Amino acid sequence: MQLIDLFPHLTVKPAPGKPSLISGLSQDSRQIQPGWLFAALPGNKQDGHAYLEEALSRGATAVLSEKKTLSLPAGVIHIHAADSQKAFIEACAKFWRGRPQMAVAVTGTNGKTSVADYLHQLWDIAGWQSAALGTMGLRCAVAFPGSELRGLTGNLTTPPPEKFFAIMDMLGKAGVGRLAFEASSHGISQQRFSGLAVHIAVFTNLGRDHLDYHGSMEEYFASKARLFEENLLAGGIAIINIDDEWGQKLAVRLQDRQLAILTFGRAKTADFRIHLLQPESFGQLLEVTYQGERFSCPLALAGDFQATNALAAGIAAHASGLSLPCSLGRLAQLKPVAGRMQPVFGHPAGARVVIDYAHTADALAAALTALRSETPGQLQVLFGCGGERDIGKRALMGKAAARLADRVIITDDNPRGEDPAAIRAEIKKACKNAEEITPRDAAIQKAVAGLASQDTLLIAGKGHETVQMIGTETLPFDDAVVARNAIAALPARRSA
């Protein structure tokens, strides 16, 4: 593609005798190939200009930068932009033009992955080609060649713009009609998907998280609200949980926008009002009314919050074109999402072991509350907190654990460059009686071995993750695998 087509508002001057064609673009110098554009973007922790030399050595033929002058080899085109990040995102949206016909964005502190996955499941049940994109990568029934997916999905909830729009292009060209994607506060504030038409936006809840980035709850909320104010198309549909106080504020804030607003929750004013959430042998029974009609929805899911996530997905499925009998009526067919209240079976004593991604105080409290009603014996929890992230939530998570669990085990999560002992100490300030056991695999093994027949152990914080970040190393680690191995080893240990 011609550079002038990607940056029409900028002056692009190709070198004499050199075509201004570009065959790819990236802000990651490690991804650059011959004929590509390198975006030297400023960042919170790193400046892209520091990697300019590497990008050039890999064959970059154009550089986008906010600096007015750069020392570049002959033949390399310099594109100056006052806002290089905005210019780069706009260029990505133009370079990769393919799109699914409908995009549904899901935002909130907790529940994004579950809602997006449940919505994808409902579309799939209906026979519609669809995909879900987010923390767990790309889930799609279409079998893409490995070469197309390689490097596009990672561990970011909302991928960087070059990967995001490359995925959009791939899905659009494959005929995937509907996409549900997780819109993180970072992704929204950095406008990673600006240029994508969002038809439906879902708000799940807002709790303390990412304040190391946003600074305050008000700024955190403002970043979430931008999805509805800037990305959601005029005439689009906003689906909002008004049991959440921030959801109530969002619904009021959007009153003057040309949007259809659908609310849900236990509140009497909710459009989709929850009347009953009742534990059953198969999971739980959800009963909800909409416009005077009552729907009874059996769910094979654990936890009130997962019922709420399922309802949000059902509403989004209806808003996307499914009839209510085909959306709410098919919630019974939903399967649990990996790492979200995921049971690990086989404990010889009959104890219950559950893996959940809960990594905020609100999510941890919700998971423990859900499990408390189903636990005749001791309710135990094992968790840690990530390093180089919002330190304020550590004591809050400790407080929630101390209040709701009978036994608390503090271990390491992803300490990254922080001292793991210091992180554990921050948590323990709010739960003095907690045990500290490290490393994480030893903690899981000891916790599993100590369970009695009617006990429940919640292993929280990492969920679906398959690595642990310690210092500068990224090591293989999967809570579910460690728990299964610990359970498998129990009979031999007990007979010894």
Image: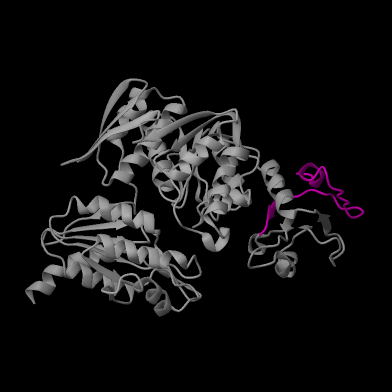
Q: Is residue 405 left or right of residue 202?
A: left
- Whether residue 470 is situated above or below residue 1 in the rendered picture: below
| Camera-side residue of 117 and 385 | 385
Q: Is residue 222 left or right of residue 1?
A: left
| Camera-side residue of 101 and 197 | 197
Q: Which residues are magenta?
A: 1-27
How far across and how far down the image is residue 125, in percent? Answer: 36, 31
- Whether residue 328 is situated above or below residue 277 in the rendered picture: above
The residue sitting at the top extreme is 292
Magenta segment: does it hold 11?
yes
Any part of residue 337 in sight: yes
How far across and how far down the image is residue 382, in percent? Answer: 29, 66
- Whether residue 91 is situated above or below residue 178 in the rendered picture: below
How far across and how far down the image is residue 249, in percent? Answer: 50, 41
Looking at the figure, which quarter contains the C terminus?
bottom left
Residue 344 lies in quadrant: bottom left
| Camera-side residue of 128 and 118 | 118
How far across and how far down the image is residue 31, in percent? Answer: 64, 60
| Camera-side residue of 324 and 79 | 324
At x 44% / y 67%, what residue is drawn?
A: 386
Looking at the figure, which quarter contains the N terminus?
top right
Residue 334 lies in quadrant: top left
Any part of residue 23 in sight: no
Magenta segment: does it hold 437?
no
| Colour mapping used in the image | one colour
